[in-house]
Image (cartoon, grey):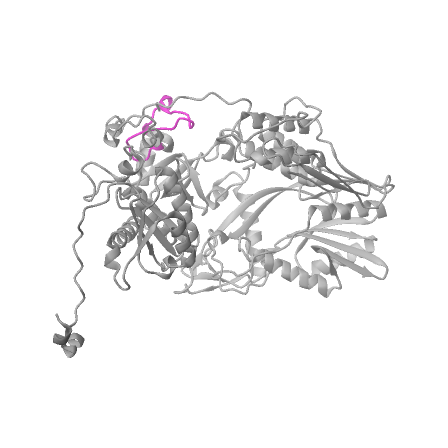
């Protein structure tokens, strides 16, 4: 139409949008020729990890989809870089065209620079025209609808929406589509292999993870832990499960109840005992309520020979509902001397149900009653109606059996129960702001003990019964009523926290602020650079208070001064007076006032480490490492060997009282993510050295010099792989080392 023929009033009154052209020109013919990108959100409720948005990358050729989760839109660039590297490395092809809408998150200068560097063409839609990116828009709608349906089917909590969407993507990548060739799935076209779907289970189903024997509470303890199935982790062949206590774990052997829990019990009773395969090989059954091995899909998902064995063929070879077959995977013999056990003793129950139904239920009930009484005394919360616009999180009972030293020197076993807030679901800026709180440094503790031995000062110990319950809470936080203590009059109400509770992210900070204010009001002042060291000079008396969360070391030049500060603390807080210090943070204190010596050691902890690693009866050796030992990073870590656990346990021993282990642990800790049998042989030698030197420790002597002396040295390009030098230093004070380090 010529300009002169335009009727301007008609344009204002009758203008219509230009029709969208039908898709033409055919589809792309290779992977990554065209990728669709779009963001969804913000969601009405943050996920467990704090995400409010999700983004999808969809390859137009294969329809393969990857999903990311973001707390804010500005995080998109960093996540896109990660995905870009992964996708191009996997396919060996560079992305040609990226298509998205015209949002600000896609139009930043950093995004443009990245596209210029990689040569990618970035196509954006016209404002207010999401139809131009229809493939991504439809995909996000499908994923949200799938997630909503799965969550509704099993009545899953709303904050698990991210897991539901991730599972929806996992399913979509393994099913056919009208947009793809007949019989093909996104997994086929993206990886070149047929997907195996025999391991897939109903999202949100009740399930039980099979526990390793080291996690079982005694001979007759539960062999499984109950939870809810949340999907399939990307980084391992396993199942993702959230347990009843709120902990999210990855497990390989899982028992599922996809329809009815009662059916699981019936199936389990019918299973013949001699047909059960060991946990290492897994169980396979076509029945509901089976014990599933998540590694089963390894062979079909990654076929090195490029064969096209289909998922249907695999399913056709499955067993009937009434029998189990042995896994076809080859059994692996035990590796050297290791047995895969945890370094944490599981003597205490892990859930409220275990505590009230176990053999020591009466003791645990008393411990929980004491905790609830302390909470009531401190007026930690008040019951209120459930808020409509605030998140209500859950609490969890945590149980521990503690060995404490009484005033007379006897060891007392104490059952301790703590009601903890599930702070792992708190979101910064919404449920808390700051969470940092200092603790005393090990070097400070050793220096104070050296001065105590040199001057003949008194050394006592106290701890707070309910330390974190004393902190005043600034934020508005709500919690469900705790298990076993729901108010029968108001069962539907929730707890509005007025003071800090264990597990709250801000609880340590609130507690430290309360204690800091109290000590400073009594005339104490901080000693730099340790914020947990307090000093008071009172009428010629020296009083030192050393704080480590709820543990307290009291040092004074006389007993009268000790009793004075104890009385002040007793009047303000609920305290346990442990008398003369015997153990602090696992460090054993043995003092001989007659000779003026004080020995600091960790013999008991060392024995526990050796026992848990199966090295309690090993042959001792005189040195921790071979002279001139050179180790190199392995291509792949052997997860069957507890190398990380061994290094971590020995590191605490080294940090506390064993400078003789500094070089060995510093060297071996470089390989915690890339170790092999050679590295495990080296850590085994360190354990043998610990076996022969369990009585070693730091001995502070009043007759030794209290002048700080420092020593340092370094080799010259001693690391053959990086040609970097290893340096080390130690500082001596009062006859023993108080600070040391060795690093590359």
Asked whether, in this view, residue 572 is left or right of residue 367, the answer is right
- Residue 577: x and y in percent read 71, 51
- Residue 551: x and y in percent read 67, 50
- Of residues 655 and 604, the one nearer the viewer is 655
In this view, the residue farthest toward the bottom is 9
Q: Which residues are magenta?
A: 270-292
Q: Report if residue 51 is visible in the image.
A: no
- Residue 115: x and y in percent read 38, 51
- Of residues 584 and 171, the one nearer the viewer is 171
Asked whether, in this view, residue 68 is left or right of residue 681, the answer is left
649 drawn magenta: no
What residue sits 44% from the left and 41% below the top? Answer: 249
What residue sits 12% from the left and 75% below the top? Answer: 5
Quadrant into which the N terminus falls: bottom left
- Image vertical order of residue 390 relative to residue 100, above or below: below
Q: Report if residue 424 is visible in the image.
A: yes
What residue sits 37% from the left and 33% below the top? Answer: 294
Quadrant into which the C terminus falls: top right
Most common SS among magenta residues: loop
Which image quadrant is residue 275 in? top left
- Of residues 316 and 119, the one nearer the viewer is 119
- Residue 534: x and y in percent read 73, 57
What residue sits 19% from the left and 39% below the top? Answer: 181
Which image quadrant is residue 285 in? top left
- Counting every numbered tag in the picture gives 0
Asked whether, in this view, residue 24 is left or right of residue 121, the answer is left
- Image vertical order of residue 710 relative to residue 122, above or below: above
Which image quadrant is residue 656 in? top right
């Amino acid at each position: 139409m010529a300009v002169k023929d335009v009727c301007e009033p008609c344009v204002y009154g009758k203008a219509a949008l230009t029709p969208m052209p039908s898709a033409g020109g055919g589809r792309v013919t290779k992977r990554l020729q065209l990728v669709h990108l779009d963001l969804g959100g913000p969601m009405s409720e943050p996920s467990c990890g704090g995400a409010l948005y999700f983004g999808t990358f969809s390859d137009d050729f294969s329809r393969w989809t990857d999903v990311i989760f973001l707390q804010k839109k500005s995080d998109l660039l960093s996540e896109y870089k990660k995905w870009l590297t992964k996708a191009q490395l996997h396919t060996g092809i560079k992305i040609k065209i990226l298509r998205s809408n015209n949002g600000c998150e896609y139009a930043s200068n950093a995004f443009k620079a990245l596209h210029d560097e990689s040569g990618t063409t970035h196509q954006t839609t016209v404002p207010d025209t999401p139809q131009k990116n229809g493939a991504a828009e439809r995909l996000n709608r499908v994923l949200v609808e799938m997630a909503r349906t799965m969550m509704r089917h099993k009545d899953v909590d709303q904050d698990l929406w991210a897991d539901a969407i991730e599972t929806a993507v996992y399913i979509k990548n393994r099913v056919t589509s009208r947009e793809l060739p007949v019989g093909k799935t996104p997994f086929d076209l993206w990886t070149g292999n047929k997907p195996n779907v025999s391991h897939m289970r109903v999202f949100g189903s009740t399930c039980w993870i099979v526990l390793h024997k080291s996690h079982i509470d005694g001979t007759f303890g539960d062999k499984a832990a109950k939870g809810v199935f949340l999907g399939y982790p990307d980084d391992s062949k396993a199942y993702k499960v959230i347990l009843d206590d709120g902990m999210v774990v990855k497990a390989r052997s899982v028992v599922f109840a996809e329809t009815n829990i009662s059916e699981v019990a019936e199936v389990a009773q019918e299973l013949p005992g001699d047909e059960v395969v060991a946990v290492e090989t897994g169980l396979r059954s076509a029945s509901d309520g089976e014990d599933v091995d998540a590694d089963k899909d390894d062979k079909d998902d990654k076929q090195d020979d490029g064969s096209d064995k289909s998922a249907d063929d695999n399913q056709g070879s499955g067993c009937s509902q009434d029998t189990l077959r042995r896994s076809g995977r080859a059994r692996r013999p035990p590796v050297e001397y290791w047995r895969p056990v945890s370094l944490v003793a599981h003597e205490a129950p892990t859930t409220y149900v275990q505590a009230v139904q176990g053999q020591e239920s009466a003791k645990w009930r008393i411990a929980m009653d004491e905790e609830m009484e302390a909470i009531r005394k401190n007026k930690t919360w008040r019951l209120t109606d459930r808020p409509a616009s605030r998140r209500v999180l859950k609490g969890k009972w945590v149980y521990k059996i503690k060995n404490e030293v009484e005033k007379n020197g006897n060891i007392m076993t104490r059952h301790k129960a703590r009601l903890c807030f599930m702070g792992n679901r708190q979101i910064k800026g919404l449920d808390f702001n700051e969470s940092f709180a200092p603790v005393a440094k090990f070097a400070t503790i050793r220096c104070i003990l050296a001065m105590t031995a040199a001057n003949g000062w008194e050394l006592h110990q106290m701890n707070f019964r309910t330390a974190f319950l004393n902190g005043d809470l600034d934020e508005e936080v709500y919690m469900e009523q705790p298990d076993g203590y729901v108010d029968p009059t108001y069962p539907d109400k929730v707890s509005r926290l007025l003071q800090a509770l264990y597990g709250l992210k801000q609880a340590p900070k609130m507690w430290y602020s309360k204690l800091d204010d109290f000590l400073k009001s009594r005339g104490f002042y901080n000693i730099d650079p340790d914020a947990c060291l307090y000093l008071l000079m009172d009428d010629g008396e020296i009083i030192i208070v050393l704080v480590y969360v709820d543990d307290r070391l009291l040092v004074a030049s006389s007993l009268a001064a000790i009793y004075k500060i104890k009385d002040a603390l007793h009047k303000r807080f609920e305290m346990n007076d442990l008398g003369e210090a015997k153990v602090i943070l696992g460090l054993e204190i043995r003092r001989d006032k007659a000779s003026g010596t004080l020995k600091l050691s960790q013999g008991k902890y060392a024995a526990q480490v050796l026992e848990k690693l199966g090295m309690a009866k090993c042959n001792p050796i005189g040195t921790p490492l071979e002279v001139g030992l050179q180790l190199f990073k392995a291509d792949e870590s052997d997860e069957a060997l507890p190398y990380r656990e061994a290094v971590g346990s020995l590191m605490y021993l080294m940090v506390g009282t064993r400078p003789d282990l500094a070089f060995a642990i510093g060297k071996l800790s470089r390989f915690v993510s890339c170790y092999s049998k050679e590295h495990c042989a080296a850590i085994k030698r360190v354990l043998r050295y610990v076996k022969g030197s369990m009585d070693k420790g730091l001995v502070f002597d009043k007759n030794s010099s209290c002048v700080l002396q420092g020593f340092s040295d370094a080799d010259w390009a001693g690391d053959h792989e990086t040609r970097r030098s290893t340096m080390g230093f130690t500082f001596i004070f009062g006859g023993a080392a108080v600070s040391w380090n060795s690093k590359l």
